[in-house]
Image (cartoon, rainbow, N blue to C red):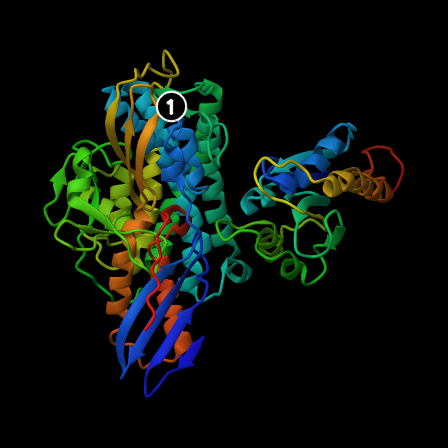
Amino acid sequence: MSEPGSGDSRRITVDLLTRVEGEGALTLRTRGGELESCELRIFEPPRFFEAFLVGRHWTEAPDITARICGICPVAYQMSACHAMEAMAGVRIDGPLRDLRRLLYCGEWIESHGLHVGMLQLPDFLGYPDAIAMARDHPELVRTTLRLKQTGNRVMRTLGGREIHPVNVRLGGFYRLPARADLQALVPELEWALDAARGLAERIAELEFPDFHQDYELVALVHPDEYPFNEGRLVSTAGIDVPVGRYDEVLVEHQSPHSTALHTATARGTPVLMGPLARYALNHERLTPLARETAARIGLGAVVDNPFRAICVRLVEIVFACEEALRILRGTVSADQAAVPVPLRAGTGCGATEAPRGLCYHRYRVDADGLITEAKIVAPTSVNQARIEADLRALLAGELSRPDDELRFLCERAIRNYDPCISCATHFLDLRVERS
Amino acid sequence: MKDVRVIGVGNAACGDDGAGLAVAAALADRALPKVAILRSDGDGAELMQMWAGAARAYVVDAVRGAGPPGRVHRLAAGSPGLSARLGPGSSHQFGLAEAVELARALGSLPAELIVFGIEGRRFAPGTGLSPEVAAAVPRVAWRVLAEIRAAQPVRRPRRGGGRPS
């Protein structure tokens, strides 16, 4: 809705953002043709996860945090496991490490597939939603749905079920998947690999708004592989620290209009996480067909147009399929489902790459194995400030447009980041100022 | 898979949201030879896969906001306005209403898809079915069964014999 204000001021609100995970809204205020404020309001109710982890046993963290998100539960399980294992001084190597990567491949394929086809593609093809798009482009919808189902199947095979998997534990898994069940994934992943490559070429031909931003991009960087579970915390503006020093370089602060905490670098710069960041910092380590796909669709070393994030997501689906197939064709049998992780009281940090960007966990655990403090930072929280900055830049030359067009432009821009608002919310002490 | 499918939708851990699963469990006990009994958490893509290729599908789910607890709604997917009446169950994923409309757009909706909605009272975790909903479960199972039987026989002519249908 739009409210006429005094003089030539306008207030435009998008009361409920659609095709995003969770509940958020946007308010723009303009005065004299200038943008006065732009607030992405996240009003998804606070979730209290960090508070109710306190007092729970440290081995419960992967199962409790998996409940934060139905789309990217693996990210939470993996970050929790790595934080606890770092505290215990245990490293997971060999087949168990590969199986964790395989599980993560499933989550990326499922999450990116859903976002590309159901949430973002309607914007590019001019439809209000995927249902309307399906009438004219049924094959696009069928393909992306099957991609999502392929990822779900990988998650179900390793995790026991695709939403909130139950088979992940500190040190590995509760039960190893049967070899036959793993091998049964191969044909569908081979189909998915081809389908994602074809889809990438098709989508790269769409029209993209000419919009470029100078981002400080943040992602994990690993010397040998495109990152899932491991790496240093690196930014394109010079941050390069081990994950354990996250809190020194990225700082959270409250913003009254959002139930999700905002993040900036220690220097106060908003940062962007997610596909654009991973790609810019790691594209040399993509698998061969993913690299070829990126080159074929014309992605340079850095993609600075957020509207092209859909292309990077497709390159990442290609990568995840290739990586999954590499793992499945190698030695996937492990001697044991998990290695022992002995309790060592202290503080542990872990960060892994959720589909939407880096997911950071920090836990303090006492000598009885009980969690005394938990901190969880979801990538959507971190990206909020950058989303708002993008919207301000995007709207600068567009404010003369009618409200409906502005509203669509903003919604579309927000969907570029695939925000998972339900993941991002934390409790916030809201202060109401009245004058 | 079998021509007739019954899909119970819900989450047994969330009070009356387990209604659809309870109906599926009640029907599974009947050991119906020509009917596949399936359970889903309500993910739209999964629902579409579950009813793909079926001649008839019955989806049973908990609903809220359209009457007293325990009331049973019967909605045919062929009728317009089904999705408007179901509404989006979650903003986090696409659910039953979207799956019906998407399947319709893709031409993969079964010829007959009936949604039985059981009006729930409480959806908080760990509360179990409310008495009203627990009482509705056998009634809905009976109605689904009655519809399946009324629509029988789903016999196909056998090659080289069999009665003409």
Left or right, A39 with reference to A150: left
Name which quarter of the figure residue B13 lies in: top right
For the C terminus of chain B, which image quadrant?
top right
Q: Please, is residue A386 above or below residue A37 in the view?
A: above
Q: Is residue B63 visible?
A: yes
> Closer to the camera, A239 or A365?
A365
For the N terminus of chain B, which image quadrant?
top right
Badge 1 crowding class, 10 Å Cα cut-off, few under 14, some 14 to 19, many 20 or more, is some
Residue A8 rendering spot, x and y as whole percentages: 32, 86
Say which amino acid is labelled 1: Thr
Name which quarter of the figure residue B42 lies in: top right
Residue pushed farthest top? Answer: A335
Residue pushed farthest right? Answer: B163
What residue is drawn where x is 38% and y is 23%? Answer: A59
> Closer to the camera, A343 or A206?
A343
Parent chain of label 1? A
Left or right, A244 with reference to A360: left
Residue B157 rendering spot, x and y as whole percentages: 83, 37
Residue pushed farthest bottom? Answer: A7
The secondary structure type at the circle numbered 1 is: helix
> Closer to the camera, B75 or A269?
A269
What residue is drawn where x is 37% and y is 55%? Answer: A202
Q: Is residue B9 visible?
A: no
Residue A408 rendering spot, x and y as whole percentages: 40, 69
Left or right, A245 with reference to A306: left
Residue position marked by numbered label 1 in the rendering: A59
